Amino acid sequence: MRPDGPRDPVAGPHSGPEAPFPIKLSGPVIKGFGRGSKELGIPTANIPPGALDQYPDLSTGIYYGLVGLLLPASPPDTSSTSLSPSPPPSAATSSPSIHPAVLSIGYNPFYANKSRSIEIHVLPQHNPSTAPTSLPSDFYGAPLNLLILGFIRPEYDYVSKESLIEDIHVDCEVARRSLEREAYRRFEGGEWGSGCWVGGEGRGERRRGRRDVGGEGEGGGAGSGCDISEVK
């Protein structure tokens, strides 16, 4: 159950991510449980949970980080109410975009999910110098790069859907404030978000010294070089 008392305004050390972070996961956006927008008012983008296979000891819970998205140049038709996944993006794509994000990794005890999932909520950009980024209502099949930078809290069960929603909104604000710190903002310019893209089942890559993600045979092509060790 959720503990009583006020929540911390930020999560993670002010000096920047500590081991095991940053953690990079990649995968195409897949269809989730369909509850984020309809029941909770928090739309999410899911990637295949197989991306977590390299992190068997990673705790379930709520995390924050950054998302790199590569969307089709022409957004999908959002007027359709079909729940069928959209086809994968064509070769004609827009420029990669980087977004703050809060995410859930686990089973969501309130709904008693039987399988682990990665559910990512892309946070609105709060930059007064640029126009807000508008995302399509669904972008199934779009390549997504995820850089997890910190842990917010464990998963909890809830006595009501309203208490779950309340905590999710707090999670969003904790994630936003945590990512606004200078030691975390420096990751926004890393090649991890725009240098390589996965076209199939998600993969996870852990930072071990200097490590390129997405090289030959890794879904990124020769020399794509998503190297998060460049961010210091």
Image (tube, rainbow, N blue to C red):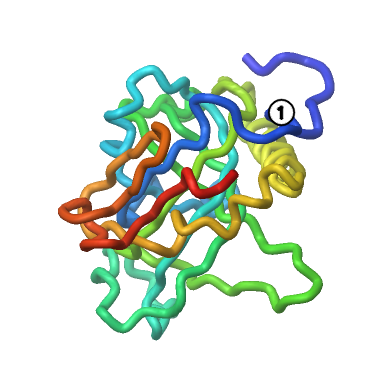
Place residue 28 in its image quadrant. Answer: bottom left
- Which residue appears at 42% of the width and 42% of the height? 24
Q: Tell me, yes or no, if residue 187 can be seen here.
A: yes
Residue 142 coordinates in the image, percent (x, y): 34, 65
**Which residue is depicted at the point 42% across and 27% down?**
107
Query: Dot 1 surroundings within 10 Å: few (below 14), some, or many (20 or more)?
Result: few
> Horizontal placement of 202 versus 35: left or right?
left
Position of 44 relative to 21 (above/below): below
Image quadrant assignment for residue 81: bottom left
Q: Where is residue 100 in the image (x, y as percent from the top left)?
A: 61, 53
Q: Name the residue under label 1.
A: 13
Image position of 133 with respect to 178: above or below: below
Q: Where residue 5 sits in the image (x, y, percent)? A: 82, 17
Query: Foreground: 162 or 60?
Result: 60
- State the residue in front, 177 or 86: 177
Residue at figure coordinates x 53%, y 54% from the top left: 43
Left or right, residue 181 beside residue 42:
right
Residue 134 spot, x, y in % from top left: 59, 74
Query: How many numbered dots are placed on residues in this image?
Result: 1
Q: Is residue 41 visible?
A: no
Question: Which residue in the rendered view is the most extreme toward the left?
Answer: 217
**Kind of residue sitting beneath label 1:** Pro
The quarter in which the C terminus is drawn is: top right
Which residue is rendered at x = 56% and y = 55% of the image? 122
Question: Which of the image's four quarters has the N terminus?
Answer: top right
In the depicted view, which residue is nearer to us: 48 or 12? 12
Q: Is mark 1 on a helix, strand or loop?
A: loop
